[in-house]
Amino acid sequence: MVQKLRWFFLESKYRNRSYANKFFFCELLNLVNVFAQWFLLNIFLNGAFETYGREFLHYFEPEQDQAIAAQAGQT
């Protein structure tokens, strides 16, 4: 069984090169698509998409006084 698998992998080692090239080309297109979507969405939202993630995280941060009180054990 192991001999058959070894033979199969050695015989078909370079047969999938065109498939691999097509696959990596499609992955490159996906990456270009992600950046294009980000760029177009940022234009559509008048630049608000660039800072959306930081503003979203800032919304859930506790206020400075609450954080100090929580560290001190006060409520």
Image (cartoon, rainbow, N blue to C red):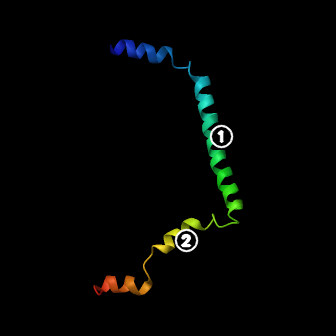
Q: Residue at x 60, y 38 (%)?
A: 27
Residue 68: horizontal and vertical position, in percent?
Answer: 37, 85
Q: Residue at x 70, y 60 (%)?
A: 44
Residue 15: horizontal and vertical position, in percent?
Answer: 56, 18
* Mark 1–mark 2 distance (CA, rounded to whole Å): 30 Å
Few, some or many C-alpha atoms within 10 Å of disc 2 (few <14, some 14-19, many ≥20)?
few
Residue 59 or residue 67, whichever sits in front: 59
Q: Is residue 72 above or below residue 39?
A: below
Total marks drawn? 2
The image quadrant of residue 73 is bottom left
| Residue hosting label 1 | 29
Q: Are marks 1 and 2 in contact (CB under 8 Å)?
A: no
Q: Residue at x 49, y 69 (%)?
A: 57
Look at label 2 and name its amino acid: Glu
Look at label 1 and name its amino acid: Leu
Along the horizontal axis of the image, is 33 left or right of 16?
right
Along the horizontal axis of the image, is 49 left or right of 11?
right
The image quadrant of residue 54 is bottom right
Few, some or many C-alpha atoms within 10 Å of disc 1 (few <14, some 14-19, many ≥20)?
few
Q: Judging from the image, what secondary structure is the residue with disc 1 in?
A: helix
Residue 50: horizontal and vertical position, in percent?
Answer: 63, 64
Q: Is residue 73 above or below residue 21?
A: below
Q: Judging from the image, what secondary structure is the residue with disc 2 in?
A: helix
| Residue hosting label 2 | 55
Q: Which mark is residue 19?
A: none
Where is the N terminus found, in terms of image quarters?
top left
Residue 14 or residue 24, whichever sits in front: 24
Residue 66: horizontal and vertical position, in percent?
Answer: 38, 84
Where is the C terminus found, in terms of image quarters?
bottom left
| Residue found at the very far front of the displayed protein | 44
In terms of sequence position, does the residue under pointer 1 or pointer 2 come before the other? Answer: 1
